[in-house]
Image (cartoon, rainbow, N blue to C red):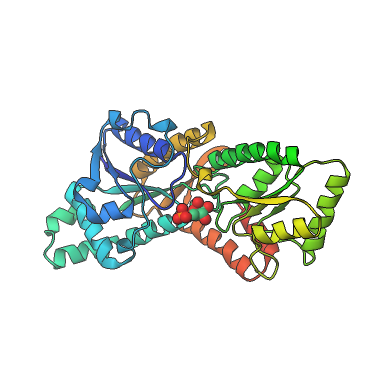
Amino acid sequence: GKRIAVMTSGGDSPGMNGAVRAVVRQTLASGGVAYAVYEGYQGLVDGGSMIKEMRWEDVRGWLSEGGTLIGTARCKAFMERPGRLTAANNMIEKGINALIICGGDGSLTGADKFRSEWPSLMDELVSTGKRKEDEVKHHRHLNIVGLVGSIDNDLSGTDATIGCYSSLERICQSIDYIDATAFSHQRAFVIEVMGRHCGWLALMAGVSCGADFVFCPENPPSENWESEMCNIIKKHREMGKRKTIVVVAEGAHDRQLNHISPTMVKDLLSEKVGLDTRVTTLGHVQRGGPPCAYDRMLATLQGVEAVKAVLESTPETPSPVICIVENKIVRKPLVDAIARTKEVAANIAKKDFEAALKGRDAE
Ligand code: F6P
């Protein structure tokens, strides 16, 4: 049987525990041995008790838990080759030949680099006398499978990342809470939401909550957005609305790539529209808390698929990332998905927003 390790990396997201649970149990069900790597890549570098064999009951009750129970970290040591060499050695120690990583695009890029470097890492372990040739014999090929765990929903090629719907739900509830007090005082609220360079959370929250205006990075507002926004909000007030909600993605900017901050928006609403305005930065409440049903389901189906991908892979198969496209769980080449994601960012940097939007939607 295969010896499959699972790890969570980068920012935590709701549903990661469900993914770990599914990987562990599917591995055991297919006759393999399951390991969990604690504290992300740091655990892989530290080895020892940080790489723990997992039994069926070890993941009991994990489906509904928020965050990641096996921990996560942004690891510097793994960015350098010596760190990766130590990590490889620790994996040989436990006989692990496959690694399933649940994380964002940065973590998955690191994973693919690890795989392409793997044969040379094996050579180095042998040539430096750390391992004997017959010890690495069965480890000439490393299997890597990616699961996308992020609240940002920022990976091209998948409709949803594990965690994004829980986060959206939390944002929606928070805005509902704010709505009540906004209505009471006839106030305006500028709400900053997470998403890093991606506007998915902001846009979907705007749609779900009936926001008056939304700022998101892929589709920056027109040159005269200041008066445009003020006019729209004035109009909504004239129509009898007692409250104003403006959602600002944390990565929002104008067409010249100048950051649009919640404070800038607040000042406009107070000074130009005359509204009593407050800023609310939702922060990490958007990332914590129990996963919604959709994320539990996505994590479970994708975790199972990740183990299947490991079992079916050959040295020639490119590392896959498990996606969901039109409600179907599919495998795609990891490098392609990351390359397309980077393309969107590059188009934004070039101020080609049309191309960025197309890339974001592209299959
Ligand atoms: O990628 C998830 C995310 O929550 C982003 O939305 C946000 O920009 C970032 O992580 C915050 O990172 P940290 O938790 O390290 O402050």
Left or right, 309 with respect to 192, comes to: left
Q: On screen, 258 above or below 138? A: below
Q: Is residue 105 in view from this perspective? A: yes
Q: Residue at x 18, y 55 (%)?
A: 136
Q: Position of residue 259 (x, y in %)?
A: 63, 65
Left or right, 31 with respect to 219, comes to: left
Q: On screen, 199 above or below 226? A: above
Q: Nearer the viewer, residue 83 or 181?
A: 181
Q: Residue at x 35, y 44 (%)?
A: 310
Q: Is residue 138 in view from this perspective? A: no
- The number of numbered badges drawn on the structure is 0
Left or right, 84 with respect to 345, comes to: left
Q: Position of residue 291 (x, y in %)?
A: 49, 35
Q: Position of residue 225 (x, y in %)?
A: 77, 62
Q: On screen, 214 above or below 301? A: below
Q: Position of residue 253 (x, y in %)?
A: 66, 63
Left or right, 85 with respect to 320, comes to: left
Q: On screen, 177 above or below 353? A: above
Q: Residue at x 40, y 38 (%)?
A: 17
Image quadrant holding the N terminus, namely: top left
